Amino acid sequence: MAQSLYSINPDRNVAWNTLPMLPIHQDLYRDFDIMDSLIEAKAAISRLQGRSIVMPDPSVLINSVILQEARFSTEIENIFTTEDELYKAFGEEIETETGDVKEVLHYREAIWQGFEHLKKMGKFDIEYLLKIYRTVKKANDGFRPPQSKVYIKQGGTGPNAGKVIYTPPAGDELIKQLLTNLVAFINDDKTYKIDPLLKMIIAHYQFEAIHPFRDGNGRVGRILNIHILTQKGILDLPVLFLSKYILETKDQYYNLLAGVSQRGGWKSWLKYMLKAVELTANSSYQKINEIVELKKSITEILVDSKEFTRPEGLADMIFTQPYSKVKHFTSSKIYAENTARKYLERLCEKPFNILQKKRISGNDYFVNIDFVRILGE
């Protein structure tokens, strides 16, 4: 049935230049099981939306949540960072970091640049995709040229490792046509009347199938997901990220993507992604609750102790910077250097035990232990 409604890829070793334009046939998503999964996913994301908009200071938490998304998304691409590297980089300038840490920070930067681009333009366009790609990769090129032969190969170390499982469309004009169709599908809710969550999932597949850039397509596609949700008003803030779930189910994710191109397996792909949204939204909701409660508890402890001037500012800063340094307080003009150091050292001691002092690359960092634990769960 699915194959009769969707033209599948006839030869995975040859560029799929007949990749169908959007929209897909409505019978591929108007299915009882898919609608049931959609209801559960929408309920979870609505609850997350309700919680995220009442956070006292969303920016304090969102940057840290985004940093974790950047970490998990880059791990999907086999780019790994340690916790110390991640949060050390969080408190420094991008230009001071190298290697895998820099890749994570570029991802975080791309999320915010894309968010601002959409606020300014009011819609998706090809320039948005180019901006995300160029920020993620710190590149100045555009779509992959015809001579750039790209093959998607089986990963791992099994007997099929290295085997070609998909070859994306080739040709500059064809890629532009497919992307023009893609952004029209995302933007036009009158012509393409489909639930925004389903639209996001279909668009994600289509972008990955087009595979328009030499590298970084997976990261650009995952950033596209969250921006579709914020642009459609499903979420006001970028607080739902699917990368951890995808990382934990990586083989299934790639198998289901291949299943659409090889067998027209849209139902399995849609159900998988809807479950990812549901579980991730529930996890994010719980994470936000825990962070808000932790911050409230620590603020009350600092106020009640009467040991600290500006206790609320002290609490704000150790949640803005999970790995705090003295300079974070002095540059923000919350405390003078000696006062900042004394307070941070005090928070490492009994009865507080809120922070843990770490020596990293010759510098002292003060780690908000429970905050970092919640973010990493």
Image: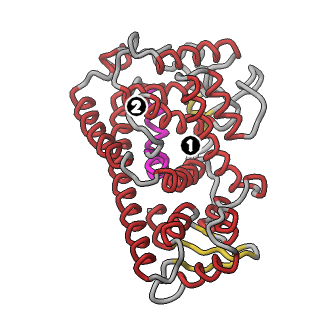
CA–CA distance in space, label 2 to label 1 = 42 Å
Question: Mark 2 highlights which residue?
Answer: 233
User: Would residue 203 appear left or right of 171 to someone viewing this image?
Assistant: left
Position in image of residue 203 (x %, y %): 47, 26
| Helix, strand or loop for disc 1 | loop
Which part of the image, by quadrant, shows the C terminus? bottom left
Residue 15 lies in magenta, yes or no?
no
Say which residue appears at 71% left-offset and 34% top-offset. Answer: 134
Say which residue appears at 69% left-offset and 55% top-offset. Answer: 100
Which part of the image, by quadrant, shows the N terminus? top left
Q: Amino acid at mark 1?
A: Asn
Closer to the N terminus: mark 2 or mark 1?
Answer: 1
The span shown in magenta is 240-260
Disc on res. 62: none
| Helix, strand or loop for disc 2 | loop
**Colouring used for the render:** secondary structure
Position in image of residue 220 (x %, y %): 59, 36
Say which residue appears at 27% left-offset and 30% top-offset. Answer: 34
Identify whether 126 is placed above or below 67. Answer: above
- Frontmost of labels 2 and 1 is 2
Q: Characterize the local packing of mark 2: few (<14), some (14-19) or many (20 or more) Cα atoms within 10 angstroms.
A: few
Question: Mark 1 highlights which residue?
Answer: 160
